[in-house]
Image (cartoon, helix red, strand yellow):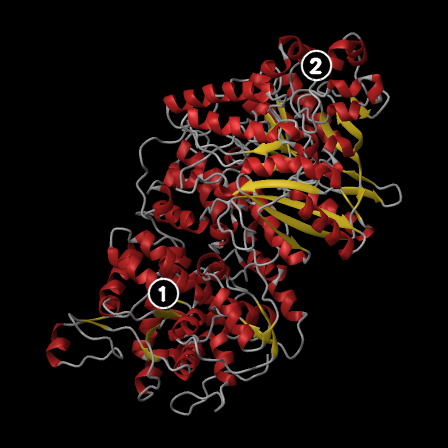
Amino acid sequence: MSDLEAELRGAVRGDVGFDVTSRALVTMDASNYRRVPLGVVAPRDADDVAAVLAVCRAHGVPVVPRGGGTSIAGQATGTGVVLDFTRYMNRLVTLDPAARTAVVQPGLVLDRLQEAAAPHGLRFGPDPSTHSRCTLGGMIGNNSCGSHSVAWGTTADSVRELDVVTARGERLRLGRGWAGAPDGLRALVEGERARLRTGFPELPRRISGYALDALLPEKGADVARSFCGSEGTLGVLTEAVVDLVEAPRARALAVLGYADECAAAEAAVGLLPYRPLTVEGMAADLVRSVAGLPRGVAWLFVETGGDSAGEARARAEAIVRAADAVDARVVTDGAGQRALWRIREDASGTATRMPDGTEAWPGWEDCAVPPARLGAYLRDFRALLTAHGLRGAPYGHFGDGCIHVRIDFDLLTEAGVGRFRRFSEELADLVVAHGGSLSGEHGDGQARAELLPRMYGDEMVALFERAKAVWDPDDLLNPGMLVRPAPLDSGLRFAVLPREPVDVAFGYPGDGGDFTAAVRRCVGVAKCRTTTASGPAVMCPSYRATGEERHSTRGRARLLHEMLAGEVVTDGWRSEEVREALDLCLSCKGCRSDCPVEVDMATYKAEFLHHHYAGRRRPAAHYSMGRLPVWLRWVSRTRTASLANALAGVRPLAWVAKRVGGIAAQRGIPRLARETFSGWWRGRGPGGGSGDLVVLWPDTFTEHLSPSVGRAAVRVLEAAGLRVALPPTLRMRGRPVGDGRSRSAAALLTARRGRVCCGLTYVSTGQLDHARVVLRRTLGLMEPVLETDAPVVVLEPSCAAALRGDLPELLHDDPRAARLAARVLTFAETLERHAPGWRPPRLDRPAVGQTHCHQHAVLGDTADRRLREAAGLDGELSGGCCGLAGNFGFEKGHFEVSAACAEERLLPSVREADPSAVVLADGFSCRTQLEQLAGVRGRHLAEVLAEGLADGPTDGRGADAGPPPAR
C-alpha cells in the first residue's frame, strides 16, 4: 500500500487519500454491501484518471469510479482504488441553448445542470429522486431514469457523446456509427447479431446487463449508448455531451386515489396515450400522513405540461376524467406540487422503515416489467412476499412498469441471509416470467448480477463477459460487477457490526435501545449531501459549508459504522478520525427531521463525546460553555454581572478569557443581564390572568442573558388570560404549584433548594453523566407540577427540544422524564391550546428571520406560523441554521464554518428585507449571531407581541420591558 500510495501521489495532481477517514467514507454506497478500499483518489482531470489507471494496472489493483455514492446495488464500492469525481471533476463545461446540448464532467450534480439550463427553458430529461446529489457520471454508469422517463426516457436516451479512458489508458470519444469503439468490439457484435436481435426483452426500463443491442446497425451502432449502464466496468468516463429537452412552461399535478396498488398499476398504462410527463405510484403503507392526498389507499402522481397554466390544468383534468379513480385532486401551484412530490422523493428513505419501525433493505429495489403487466406482477410479488414471511412497500414508476421496494429482510443472521438468497432467486424467476428486467433503473451491481443468467441465459451472459474482455482485458475496472459477479449474499455491510448491544447512555427508543441499529439507520441515500437548502430544510449545514463528505450526516454515520466494525477505524470510542468528523457537527438536529430515515447525528455526537472523553481531560470549551449554567448562577448569586460585563469589555482581559475558555477570538462575549428574569419575577407583584395555569420555564438564556424575553412572555400570556407560575425552587413533598416560594416554615427546613435546567449545554458537549444529575434534580423539583395538568412553557427552542427529546431518551428509565417531556409547549403552542379565544395585537408588518433549527426538527412551527399570521406578521422565515448553534459557533476553530452557515440563508434574508421588517429570532444563539455578524437585533416573537399590546411595552412594575421597535 505504501508503494502504491507513493506512486499515485507522484503521478496525479489531485488528492490521494489512503488514511483511515478517506477509506472509511467510501466503504459503502446506498446498498447492502461493504468493501474496504486501499485508497481514494480525487482526480483533477482526464490526465489524472489516465495516470491512476496506469499505476493501478502496474500494481494489479482494481479501480472503481464513484459519483454521489447513491447506488443501490453495490457498484460504487470496491477493494482497490476508488475514484471520487465529486471533488474536482464536477463542472458544467459548456451549455449550448441553440443546440440544446451541454458538456458535463462526471462529478457534476444533476441539479446544478438543471439550474443552469432552466433560464433557457431547458432541462435534462431524466431526474432520479436523488437529483439534488446524484452525479451525471453515476447516472450514465447506471443508465438512471427518474419520474419523467415516460416523457423523456432514460439517461442513455439523452447521451450524445462520451469521453472515456480505458483500463489500458486508451482515450476514446464514443458516439454513433461505431465512433470510439475499442478494437475487437465491432467484430464481436457482427458475429452475434442474431443473438443480439432476439435476446433482449422489449420494455422501457430494461437496464440489466450490457446494452450490446445498441450496437446493431439498425440502432445506429451507438457506442455511447451501449456504454451507458456499464457501471464503471468498461471504461472511466471523463466528460459527456448530453442532450437537453424543452421544459414545459407550466405544469399541473393530478393525484389520483385508488382502492389498492394493483388498481393503480392497472390504470397507469391507460394514461400513457395522454402523453403525461410522469405516472408515479405509491401506496398508503409508505406515506407518513395522507394530508393533502385524495381518498384512497394507493395513488398515482400524474404530471402534465403545457405552454400555459390553463393548458397544463386542462390536460390534468382530462387525465382525471379518464382515470376511473376513487378520488382525485389537481394541483397547479408550485408550492403544493413540491410538497406532494417530496412525499414521493423521500420514499427511498422512508421505505427503509416499516410502519412498526422494523428495518427494511434494498436488494430488489427496481425490477421492471412491461407496463401492461404491472398489476398482475404486483399481485404475484405480494404473494411471494407473503410466502416468505416478508413485508415491503412497493412504489415507483408505474407508467414504465418499474417498481421500487425495500423489504424487511433479516440480514443479521445466517438463517435470514439464507432466506434473502432464496427470495431473490424466486423473485428473479417471477420478473422473467412477466417479461421483465431484473434492474429497471439502478443497475445490477452485486445485488442482481449473479442472477442475470435467469434473465438472459448462459450464452448471452458469456457474450457479456467477452464484451468486458474487449474493453478491459485485465479485469481492472470494478471487478465483481455485471460479469463474474460476487455472490449476492456476500460482503453484506451488516456482517461486521457487533452482535451484542453496545453500552450507551441514551435510550434510542426508535431502535430498541441498540446504538448499532441507530447507526444502521443511514442507508446512504445522501439527502444530507445537497449543496443548497430549500424551504424550511436544515440538514446538513456543515456539509454545505465545507463540501466534504466527512462533514455530511452520511459521512459521519459511515465513520461510526466503521468504528463499530473495528476494521478500518480500530480505536473505538477513542477514535480521533470520528471525533474530527463530528467536530463540525452543529448538533442542529436537522437530520432528525430532514433525513428520510431520521438519523439523529446530534444525539450520536453527544454519545460519542461522552465515551471519547470518559476519564480524560476535555477541551476547554466543554468546561467554559458546557457548564455555562453553573457559571451564570454563580455570577447571579455573587451579584457580579456588572463587574463581569466591565471586565469583558477590556480587550486584553477578554482575550485571555477567550483563550482560556477555548472561545474563538473573533467572538464577542455576550453581556449578562444586571437583573435576572427570576429576580424580576420575585419583585413584580401579583400577576394577572384567571384562566389556565401555565408554568413558565426560566431557561439559562432567558434567566441570565435575555430576561426581556421572559418579561415579554409573561405580559403576553397574562394578557391572554393565563395564570403564570415559575417552577418550584424548593423540593418539597406535596407542595402546591405556586410562584416558587415556600408557604411553610417546616417545609423550608426540610426542603432542598435548586433551579430547573434542561441540561442542554451538558448534552451538546457530551457530558452525559452531569446531564443526568442535572435532569434528575430538575425532575425532583418538577414533581408538584407533574401532579397537575399545567403545561410547561419553554421560550428557548433549543431548551424545549432538549426537554422533549433528550430528556426522555437520556433518562429512559425514569417515567417522570416522559411525563415532563409531554408537558412541554412552545410559546405559540401555549397560546393556541390554552387561550384559543385570544387574539394577538395586529402589527401588520413584514417579518424576516429564521425558524430555529431545533424548532424545525423537534418541535414544529405550525402554531408559530398561525400566531404570526393572526398578528399580521407577513413573510416566510428562512430555513437552515444560524450557524452559532449554542456553543458550536463560540468554540475555537469553528468561526469560519459558523459564519458560512449564517451567510447561506439567514443573513441574506435579513439584508434583503424591507427596512420596516421585524427580525424574528426565538433562539438566543440566532439573536447573538445576527448581532455579532450583521449588527442586527433579532427579537423573540413574545417581545414583538408584547410591544404591540395596547398599553405599550411595559412590564408589571412599569419598567421598560421590550426592545425598541427599530431593527
The image shows residue 498 at horizontal and vertical percentages of 36, 31
Q: CA distance from mark 2 to mark 1?
A: 64 Å
The single residue placed furthest to the left in the displayed view is 746
For the point 38% across and 56% down, the residue is 805
Going by the numbered disc 1, the residue's amino acid type is: Val
Q: Is residue 484 visible?
A: no
Going by the numbered disc 2, the residue's amino acid type is: Gly
Of the two numbered discs 2 and 1 on the same chain, state the one appearing first in sequence.
Answer: 2
Instruction: Judge whether 271 appears above or below 801 on screen.
Output: above
Structural crowding at the residue carrying mark 2, measured as other residues with C-alpha within 10 Å and reported as few (<14), some (14–19) or many (≥20): some
Q: Quadrant of residue 74?
A: top right
Structural crowding at the residue carrying mark 1, measured as other residues with C-alpha within 10 Å and reported as few (<14), some (14–19) or many (≥20): many
The image shows residue 867 at horizontal and vertical percentages of 51, 73
Labelled disc at residue 199: 2
Q: Secondary structure at mark 2?
A: loop
Q: Secondary structure at mark 1?
A: strand
